[in-house]
Image: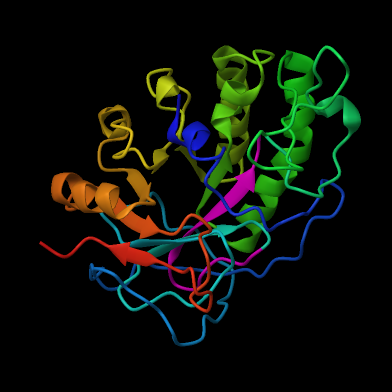
Amino acid sequence: MSPASRWSGSLQSKTSATGPESPPPRVGAVRGWGATAVAVLLVVLPGCAADPAAPAGPGLGPLPAGAVVDYQLGGAYPPADGVAGVVRDRTDSPAADLWSACYVNAFQTQPGARWPEDLLLHDASGARVEDPDWPGEFLLDVSTAERREAVLAVVGPWFDGCADAGFDAVEPDNLDSWTRSEGLLTADDAAATARLLVARAHDAGLDVAQKNAPELTGEDLGFDYAVAEDCQLFEECTAYTDAYGGAVLEVEYTDEGFEEACRLRGSTVSVVRRDLGVARPDDPGYVAAWCPER
């Protein structure tokens, strides 16, 4: 079972309610890795410079091992000095002059989103299968090749929108939703869907992340890097580093997990400490930290 399952489903922002029929407008940007990232410990960002958009241009390539990346799923804000990359919801714009990954909920609905009813997973009684820890978020039915293609027909244009906006990569979330499907979906269903999503992302010129689901790291699904939530806490990080080397963004939500991750891998993979709500700096619950430079 992945960390996402054990931490109230997926540890993501649930703020976007954009449905398939209402893609948001985008702002194009070109980004460069710029100066070497400066790692810091326990950073709070009360006020940062503006985050301007830049003209559209080519992507920056893969996430460098150990880069300082800010996980901004709760809403975009100007990155602190030394941050070399960001992850933002697809409804936000990429960060100017920084590597930027686009978050997409690819295996479940966002609360309030409108999907065709026949693409939602239903149990034997005909009821929608809901994520047990995220009310209003329903699992997509990827149990057959036909339905997987239909899901791709919705999610694929979102990937295209990420690319058009100037993002460098895409992070499709809830790969592990089969673990919350009451036995109606399998790991093979998830893997088959992932292969379609990876191919579509690559066609759009985007790198694509494996989000959680360490059980699938050995399946050769074509992902370019990994995003692993609380893998230290659940002793799963080796599955990701064995598969992706240093191309891992490790998001830890506890002080204990973060400190140990920094000790073990802080110089080789990207490690960030975030609050469970992945809040903005103006929120009292905001926590963001990176490993100290070594």
In this picture, residue 49 sits left or right of residue 255: right
Is 96 covered by the magenta stretch? yes
Q: Nearer the viewer, residue 160 or 261?
A: 261
Whether residue 222 is situated above or below residue 15 in the rendered picture: above
Is 108 covered by the magenta stretch? no
**Screen quadrant of the N terminus:** top left
* Picture residue at 28% right of the left edge, 31% below the top: 235
**Visible in this render: residue 253?**
yes
In this picture, residue 241 sits left or right of residue 53: left
Quarter where residue 199 is shown: top right
Outermost left residue: 294
Residue span colored magenta? 92-107
Whether residue 144 is situated above or below residue 105 in the rendered picture: above
Q: Nearer the viewer, residue 288 or 18?
A: 288
Give the number of marks.
Answer: 0
* Picture residue at 57% right of the left edge, 13% below the top: 188
Q: Nearer the viewer, residue 80 or 54?
A: 80
**Screen quadrant of the C terminus:** bottom left
* Picture residue at 73% right of the left edge, 46% below the top: 110
Instruction: Give the image location of residue 124, x and y in percent.
Output: 83, 12
* Picture residue at 61% right of the left edge, 67% below the top: 93
Instruction: Give the image location of residue 151, x and y in percent.
Output: 75, 30
Instruction: Give the image location of residue 278, x and y in percent.
Output: 51, 60
In this picture, residue 211 sits left or right of residue 147: left
Instruction: Give the image location of residue 91, x and y in percent.
Output: 68, 61
**Visible in this render: residue 65?**
no
Colouring of the image: rainbow
Whether residue 231 is situated above or below residue 261 in the rendered picture: above
In this picture, residue 200 sits left or right of residue 109: left
